[in-house]
Image (cartoon, rainbow, N blue to C red):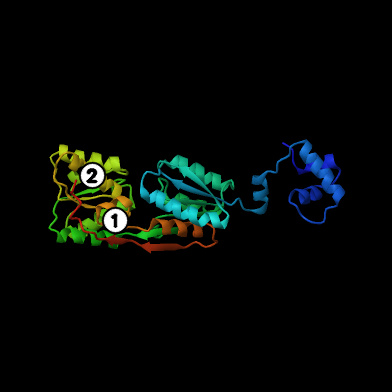
Amino acid sequence: MMNIHDIAKLSGYSAATVSRVINCRKYVSDNAKLAVQKVIKEYDYVPNDVARDLSKGKTHNIGVVMPHTKHPYYTGIINGIMDAAFPAGYRIVLLPSMYNADVEMNYLNRLRRKAYDAIIFTSHGISLEDLVNYQTYGSIVCCHDPGNYKISAAYTERIDSYLAAFKWAKEQNVHDVSILLSRDFTLSATSQLTRKAFSDVFGHAPSNDLLRTGIVTYEDGYASARSLHENNQTPDMIFSNGDDIAAGARQFYLDNNLPVPMLIGQENQLSGQLLNLPTIDHNFHEIGRLAFELAISDETKQVSVESKFILRNQKDCSDS
């Protein structure tokens, strides 16, 4: 592949002069500019942007690791990152992982090889210890509370909003609550907080019979309601991990002329607004913006945003 040294030999001018011509710098004679441009045109030379960026110590690429995009958690964070990155002149590279630790380690090694200036982990299957160890190669930001680990993080404070939601449920004389989660308690800090809030309010752990995991879409919500019905389980309430998911569960009951349990959604989605569902807004767009700002900064710090339980009137939630 041709480089500026080849152009210098062919044009008869120095590599420094060639570089000035390519980058439209001053202090280049007309004769030199014409000679260099003639070689560039003849050999169809295109500058290597990657090499140029590396010479400057920056790629202006930020990698964003995400297991999938099916849940509004990820799309909300991505939208926040994109809205902050574009005016700052950065490119965002989406890195799918499906929680595969080997895949995520490969992304970390690409950070080590300077493919990205930083990586934001919206979630991860790899250990926090590994993330901390790789910070020497570039900025790494996670989107959950890292506890005592010294790593940059932007995350939402969830526990108070979960407590508020379950306290309201208890005030409605709810006893049997079906909880729909993306991941099991053993795998997800968010799921653990949900269980803790439920236990603190109701005085006992959630029922395993009423628990459903792997729930991320409207279709999953519909299927979870069908599963509950087929197992003769009739919860007073369904606490879902998304308004679209709650809407899916609701639709199963309506399609089968069954009473609709009380519903609580999350993420303040349009479906929840139209159905007047109580919901929890975790402000993921703001989390994405903050994660990007941390990624391009030279600081290692942790910032959090409060979530909010939004109570709406459910009187029309079971209408067809």
For the C terminus, the quadrant is top left
- The relative height of residue 202 versus residue 44 in the rendered view (above or below) is below
Where in the figure is residue 100, as x and y percent of width and height? 42, 40
- Residue 220 visible to an observer of this rendering: yes
Question: Helix or strand or loop: what does disc 1 sit on?
Answer: helix
Residue 4 position by quadrant: top right
The residue sitting at the front extreme is 320
Residue in the foreground of this view, choosing between 98 and 239: 239
Type of amino acid under label 2: Ala
Where in the figure is residue 110, as x and y percent of width and height? 55, 44
Q: Which mark is residue 249?
A: 2
Residue in the foreground of this view, choosing between 187 and 163: 163
User: Which residue is drawn at the image coordinates 18% and 42% (left, top)?
Assistant: 254
User: Which residue is drawn at the image coordinates 14% and 55% (left, top)?
Assistant: 174
Residue 68 position by quadrant: top left
* Left or right of residue 114, residue 316 in this image: left
- Residue 151 visible to an observer of this rendering: no
- The relative height of residue 45 versus residue 308 in the rendered view (above or below) is above
For the N terminus, the quadrant is top right
Q: How many numbered discs?
A: 2
Q: Residues within 10 Å of mark 1 (few under 14, many from 20)?
A: some
Type of amino acid under label 1: Leu
Q: CA distance from mark 2 to mark 1?
A: 23 Å
User: Which residue is drawn at the image coordinates 25% and 48% (left, top)?
Assistant: 246
Question: Helix or strand or loop: what does disc 2 sit on?
Answer: helix
| Disc on the earlier residue, 2 or 1 | 1
The residue that disc 1 covers is 193
